[in-house]
Image (cartoon, grey):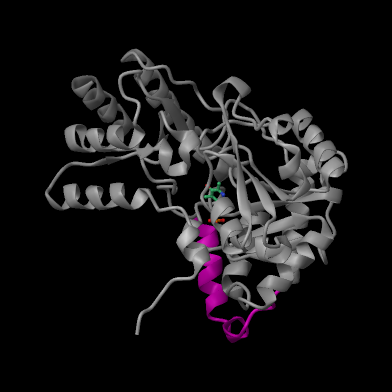
């Protein structure tokens, strides 16, 4: 029998990181001392009190059964309280908050609720891959909005052609941004709400990095914009804030009709998050938060070591205000980011993520993650100095 993939599966863009990943594993197996600045995954452990809560909750047989699709009431209440305290946004926890098996799950599933064949998603690029992937899997078409340095890595909404606007269902946004580390202010979100109302477009804002911030800066929520709850939702996650990427827990919140659409898709595809993990999530949100500031100080020291080091050896890198990424423009002589990443791996045993892996608009850049120790970052700078 000839097994054939669906057309939609064939339409998904290739996974460009796979090649670098393979090369990295090969070099490591051959004994290379790899400095990995490629991983978008915290290197610090989940705080102990959260692990203890999981341990305790996992022994309770009540938590061994199917969880409720819409998440535990106490988790939604904890999210409500957290949003109020952090952003001054008040949400109704019965129908404006939906726990997710990691925010990626919700981002990838939501197009199934709203996208019809021939519809567009407006997708910023470079970007987190599921904005495109989820749209394509639902039969829609991503319309690429390049994020350019000259526009502070914000999309130019006025450049989207009318024929696209007529069939656009979604506007994806992500600030603080992966991979560019750019931030957006409330004034931008206010413009976005006006734009969304005018063209009847649903706004999907991904705020996974809002708590990884530096120098006293606090990124706003999209939901703080006036009227935001009329047009959109925000995705949030415990992954980066509490070093819980492997646990798979996040949420969507905002407009209740949009939440209801996503909930209906999920009711037909999964059966909720392991209850013990939900209770650990409640502990994360309600428990001591001092640890977050300490973690941000650690990333900030690494950021300073990396950016100052790069600038000393003649690059032009800027210090991000949030996220654990530095988005670095390649020197003029090195334009193809994938070649440059391979060169760094081969010649300096340093792993960086080529910008083109986030879409064509990321070409000419590499992403360096602050998920290695300060010492290793300083060592990376020494190695770069030698090979460049
Ligand atoms: C890490 C990350 C997330 C979080 O995904 P989870 O599925 O919640 O772990 C979401 N968006 C972006 C842009 C990310 O980089």
Q: Which residues are magenta?
A: 47-69
Confirm whether the magenta stretch covers residue 318: no
For image coordinates 19% across by 23% down, the residue present is: 387
Q: Which residue appears at 81% of the width and 34% of the height?
A: 190
Residue 169 image position (x, y, % from top left) = 74, 52
- What is the count of numbered marks? 0
Q: Position of residue 257 (x, y in %)?
A: 83, 62
State the residue in front, 278 or 150. 150
| Image-based side of 123 in relation to 359, left or right | right
Q: Observer-nearest residue: 169 or 59?
A: 169
- Position of 43 with respect to 361 (left or right) is left
From this viewpoint, is residue 89 visible?
yes
Q: Position of residue 182 (x, y in %)?
A: 58, 31
Picture quadrant where residue 1 is located? bottom left
Looking at the rendering, in which quadrant would you find the C terminus? top left
Compared to residue 283, the image places residue 320 above or below, namely above
Secondary structure that dominates the magenta span:
helix
Residue 71 visible (yes or no): no
Going 37% across and 48% down the picture, which residue do you hit? 16
**Residue appearing at x 15%, y 53% in the figure:** 29
- The answer to if 57 sits in the magenta stretch is yes
The quarter holding residue 174 reads top right
Q: Nearer the viewer, residue 139 or 274?
A: 139
- Place of residue 165 in the rendered image (x, y in percent of width and height, measured from the top left): 75, 43
The residue lying furthest to the left in this view is 30
């Amino acid at each position: 029998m000839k097994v054939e993939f669906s057309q939609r599966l064939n339409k998904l863009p290739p996974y460009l990181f796979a090649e670098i990943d393979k090369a990295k594993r090969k070099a490591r197996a051959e004994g290379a001392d790899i400095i990995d600045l490629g991983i978008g995954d915290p290197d610090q452990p989940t705080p102990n009190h959260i692990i203890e809560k999981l341990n305790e909750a996992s022994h309770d047989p009540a938590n061994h059964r199917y969880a409720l699709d819409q998440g535990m009431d106490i988790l939604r209440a904890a999210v409500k309280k957290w949003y109020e305290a952090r952003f001054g946004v008040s949400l109704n926890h019965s129908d404006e908050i939906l726990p997710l098996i990691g925010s990626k799950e919700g981002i990838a599933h939501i197009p199934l609720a709203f996208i019809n064949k021939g519809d567009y998603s407006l997708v910023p690029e470079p970007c987190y891959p599921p904005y495109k992937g989820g749209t394509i899997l639902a039969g829609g078409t991503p319309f690429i909005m390049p994020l350019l340095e000259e526009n502070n890595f914000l999309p130019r909404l006025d450049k989207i052609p009318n024929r696209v606007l007529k069939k656009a269902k979604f506007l994806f946004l992500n600030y603080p941004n992966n991979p560019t580390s750019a931030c957006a202010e409330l004034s931008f979100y206010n413009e976005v709400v006006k734009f969304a109302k005018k063209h009847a477009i649903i706004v999907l804002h991904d705020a996974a990095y809002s708590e990884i911030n530096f120098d006293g800066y606090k990124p706003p929520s999209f939901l703080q914009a006036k009227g935001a709850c009329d047009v959109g939702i925000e995705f949030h996650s415990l992954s980066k804030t509490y070093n819980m990427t492997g646990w798979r827990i996040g949420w969507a919140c905002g407009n209740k009709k949009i939440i209801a659409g996503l909930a209906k898709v999920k009711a037909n595809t999964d059966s909720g998050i392991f209850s013990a993990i939900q209770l650990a999530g409640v502990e994360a949100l309600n428990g001591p938060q001092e640890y977050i500031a300490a973690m941000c100080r650690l990333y900030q020291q690494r950021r300073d070591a990396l950016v100052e080091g790069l600038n000393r050896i003649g690059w032009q890198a800027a210090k991000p205000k949030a996220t654990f990424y530095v988005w670095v423009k390649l020197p003029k002589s090195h334009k193809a980011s994938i070649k440059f990443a391979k060169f760094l791996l081969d010649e300096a045993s340093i792993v960086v993520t080529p910008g083109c892996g986030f879409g064509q608009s990321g070409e000419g850049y590499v992403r360096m993650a602050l998920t290695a120790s300060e010492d290793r970052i300083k060592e990376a700078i020494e190695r770069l100095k030698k090979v460049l």
